Each structure stands twice: as structure tokens, then as C-alpha cells.
Image (cartoon, rainbow, N blue to C red):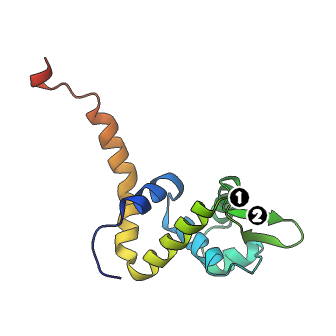
Amino acid sequence: MPDGPVPAELRQFIARYIQSVEQLEILCLLVENPNQSWSEAEIFHRIQSSQESVSAALRYFAAEGFLAYNPAEGYRVSPKTAELDRLAGELVKTYRGRRVSIVEAIYKAPEDSIRHFADAFKLRKDKL
């Protein structure tokens, strides 16, 4: 996939659902293995982050409708809508081909939101 800006649709998806690279890595693991159920311990072992943050990310993704949880089997990717499924897959595919662009989009998203919010309160000379 050629370098260039991340499509607006994916930037919006990232801004809405992804706050860290760790979350993205967890989502990638699950999306790329759609027929497998994972325990928190297995995901923690693969991601190599903190147990607490992996657990929090899994609960978050389950609450947002990306994952199904079965106490006997663990977590499995199960997007609640076809659109979530499509966008999650597109994000994973784009991330695998353009890591830097996606990581930049993750960490730039909050900054852009704050800037837009602050801009709403700026007084402009031409409007006075």
C-alpha cells in the first residue's frame, strides 16, 4: 500500500475507537485470527504489555461491540455490525502496510480534536 494520508474514514474510526498502539495490536491479533478464542493470559503473552491494560482493552472492545466473551472460551472477534467488521479489517490491513501512518493517526487524533475544540472559542476580528 503506498504511503500517503490515512483515509478520512479510517481516521474517524481511529479517533472513535483506538487510543493506543497497544489497543490496535490487540485488535489486530483478534481480527487476524477470527476463528480463535483467546484468554486474557494468551493475549497478554502475545502483546507483552501490562496485564491490567490488556484486560481493560478487552473489556473496552467487548463493550464497543468488537468482541464476544465466553467465560469458558475467552474473547473472540465478533463485530456487532458489518461496518465495524469492515473498518476493523481495513484498519488492520492498512496498519500492516503503513505502520507509521497509522501510529501517527492514533496519536494525532486527540490533538486535532483539542485544536478544533479550542478553535471554536477563538474570537475573530472579522466577526467582531
Residue nearer the viewer, 70 or 47: 70
Q: Quadrant of residue 94?
A: bottom left
> Which residue reaches farthest left?
126
> Which residue reaches farthest top?
128
Residue 82 coordinates in the image, percent (x, y)? 62, 63
Report crowding for label 1: few under 14, some 14 to 19, many 20 or more residues within 10 A (C-alpha). some
SS of the residue at dot 2?
strand
User: Are the residues flagged by discs 1 and 2 in contact, CB closer than 8 Å?
Assistant: yes
Circle 2: residue type: Ala
Query: What is the distance, in whole Å, between disc 1 and disc 2 at their CAs?
Result: 6 Å
Circle 1: residue type: Ala
Q: Residue at x 46, y 59 (%)?
A: 14
Q: Earlier in the sequence, mark 1 or mark 2?
A: 1
Residue 105 coordinates in the image, percent (x, y)? 37, 62
Q: Residue at x 30, y 35 (%)?
A: 118
Q: Quadrant of residue 39?
A: bottom right
In the rendered image, the vertical position of residue 120 relative to residue 49, given as above or below = above
Q: Quadrant of residue 46?
A: bottom right
Quarter of the picture holding the C terminus: top left
Residue 49 coordinates in the image, percent (x, y)? 60, 71
Q: Residue at x 43, y 55 (%)?
A: 12
> Disc 1 designates what residue?
62
Residue 91 coordinates in the image, percent (x, y)? 48, 70
In the rendered image, the vertical position of residue 114 relative to residue 91, given as above or below = above
Q: How many marks?
A: 2
Residue 10 located left or right of residue 65: left
Q: Residue at x 73, y 78 (%)?
A: 42
As drawn, the label of residue 116 is none
SS of the residue at dot 1?
helix
Residue 27 located left or right of residue 73: left
Quarter of the picture holding the N terminus: bottom left
As drawn, the label of residue 68 is 2
